[in-house]
Image (spheres, rainbow, N blue to C red):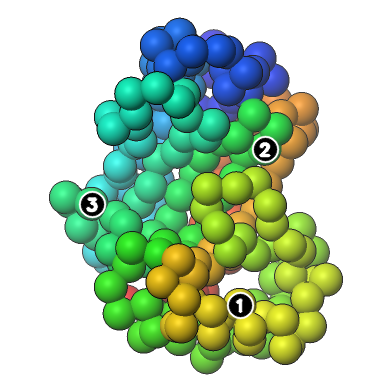
Amino acid sequence: MTKYTFKPKDFKTFSIPGLDARMSALDDNIRPQLHELGDYFSQFLETATGETFYPHVAKHARRVVNPPKDTWVAFATNKRGYKMQPHFQIGLFESQLFVMYGIMHEAKNKGQQVAVFENNMDALKQLPADYSISLDHMTQEKTYIKDMDDASIQEAIERVKNVKKGEFFVARTLEPNANELKSDKAFLTFLEDTFTQLLQFYKF
């Protein structure tokens, strides 16, 4: 019996029509693991940084018609919310599991917060080949860092400073049938390695 990982059928939750039916399936198939991951990695991040992290599992409470196309657990040092500060996420779309760290468009002082990526450009470019950048957390679209030149990375950073909806996340993804999802041990190893890499950009 697995505690943390997701099976290919869990990802199919996002193809279930109707808000109530999909939310019920999320409660059964995905949210239990998100809560377990929340407990595990809030402790992991506390050990790594010396700061207290709080897990925030998406509730989708404001939805009244359209069912969610993704869900997640976010980690931040603010107990009441995570959107206003740089934060970590583990989440799923129908065809992708994602792990990422960065800045959402609701964040305060975005220009100051995104500077950590600007000031650590070399570390960003030296990440393993499967790391990417997301400019919109609401879509699955991400671009591998290895396929971006300095100018395009800088342009993405400038967009966070100058555009209200601008976002910047460093991400790593898995397909639903990935070997890393075959067992809790393999999944946790993947996640711990990813968080360790992402922590380069968390300045505490």
Residue under numbered circle 2: 96
* Residue 173 in view in this figure: yes
Residue 82, by quadrant, is bottom left
Residue under numbered circle 3: 81
Image coords of residue 133 (percent x, y): 64, 65
Q: Amino acid at mark 2?
A: Gln
Disc number lying in front (1 or 2): 1
Residue 113, by quadrant, is bottom left
Q: Residue furthest right?
A: 147
Q: Earlier in the sequence, mark 3 or mark 1?
A: 3
Residues packed near mark 2 inside 10 Å, few (<14), some (14 to 19) or many (20 plus):
some
Q: Nearer the viewer, residue 113 or 136?
A: 136
* Residue 46 in view in this figure: no
Q: Amino acid at mark 1?
A: Ala
Residue at 57% of width from left, 13% of height from top? 16
Is the residue under label 1 in contact with that under label 3 (CB below 8 Å)?
no
Residue at 47% of width from left, 34% of height from top? 71
Residues packed near mark 3 inside 10 Å, few (<14), some (14 to 19) or many (20 plus):
some
- Element class at badge 1: helix
Image coords of residue 170 (percent x, y): 58, 64
Q: Is residue 106 left or right of residue 170?
A: left
Q: Residue furthest left?
A: 80
Residue at 74% of width from left, 70% of height from top? 145
- Element class at badge 2: strand
- Estimate the spatial distance between the alpha carbons at disc 3 and disc 2, rounded to whole Å: 25 Å
Disc number lying in front (3 or 1): 1
* Up-down relation of residue 125 to residue 99 (above or below): below
* Up-down relation of residue 171 to residue 115 (above or below): above
* Up-down relation of residue 60 to residue 200 (above or below): above
- Element class at badge 3: loop
Image coords of residue 200 (percent x, y): 51, 74
